Amino acid sequence: MKIHKEGSASIGIAIGIYVLLNLLSFYFFYGISPLISWSILLLITVPLGLVIYFFRIPFRDHTGSDEWVIAPCDGRVVAIEEVECDEYFEGRRVQVSIFMSVLNVHVNRYPIGGKVIYRKYHPGKYLFAWHPKSSTENERYSTVLQHKNGQLILAKQIAGALAKRIVNYSEEGMEVKQNEELGFIKFGSRMDVLLPLGTEVLVKLGDKPKGGVTPIAKW
């Protein structure tokens, strides 16, 4: 396991606060009762550990196939439905939505290889990411990818109630590989993948796919 580069600032701030609180604790309380200082140390070690854990990148053997759409993130499948497109596409598409809790790995990956033909940032609200309206009303990044077979999919990074920063590494015209990093969302979020009608969905509601590993659909 390694730590994602997007965690550098957050982890640095967390460590600084951790050190400062412990210095103050031992300065003011150790002489009164060492137990107080040691208890505070143990208590604030937990949130520091959680911040570091959030930015982890576990070592995995990624799955690759031109026939599969691979999960772009870890999480739980909360929606599989036909939706009327509100961006880029006209008509209906199959939407697979994956909700990420704060305990999930938050690296976002390209679900297919191909060319980035559209990328757009949308400011918005911070509804809970499991809310259906979060797909169209929350802050989000939309990225459309064109597979070499001509098929198009839209990968949508959506902020949640706690997520205050979405990072997207794509640029229009880029050629990308399946499972390369698309971006990162900090502290709770969701990803939607909009697929062509007729695409065979390989997951069901409640499944817990792993980003870069679990096939979620098949051409």
Image (tube, rainbow, N blue to C red):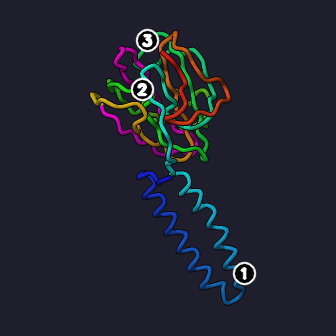
> Which of the 4 image quadrants contains residue 104?
top right
The answer to which of 176 and 122 lies nearer the viewer is 176
Residue at x 56%, y 54% (from the top left corner): 53
Side of 2 where 31 appears, left or right? right
Side of 92 where 36 appears, left or right? right
Instruction: Tell me the amino acid under the disc marked 1.
Output: Leu
Asked whether disc 3 touches disc 1, contact meaning CB atoms under 8 Å apart, the reply is no
The residues bearing labels 2 and 3 have C-alpha atoms spaced at a distance of 21 Å
Badge 3 crowding class, 10 Å Cα cut-off, few under 14, some 14 to 19, many 20 or more, is few
Q: Residue furthest left?
A: 173
Q: Secondary structure at mark 3?
A: loop
Indicate the position of residue 165 as horizontal and vertical percent values. 46, 45
Residue at x 39%, y 37% (from the top left corner): 180
Mark number displayed over residue 35: 1
Q: Is residue 165 magenta?
A: yes
Q: Which residues are magenta?
A: 144-171
The mark lying in front, picked from 3 and 1, is 1
Residue at x 51%, y 13% (from the top left corner): 199
Mark number displayed over residue 74: none
Nearest to N terminus: mark 2 or mark 3:
3
> Which of the 4 image quadrants contains residue 66?
top left
Q: In this figure, which residue is indicated by the disc labeled 2?
A: 112
Instruction: Tell me the amino acid under the disc marked 3.
Output: Glu
Residue at x 63%, y 28% (from the top left corner): 78
Asked whether disc 2 touches disc 1, contact meaning CB atoms under 8 Å apart, the reply is no
The mark lying in front, picked from 2 and 1, is 2
Q: Residue furthest front?
A: 61
Q: Residue furthest bottom?
A: 31
The residues bearing labels 3 and 1 have C-alpha atoms spaced at a distance of 64 Å
Mark number displayed over residue 90: 3
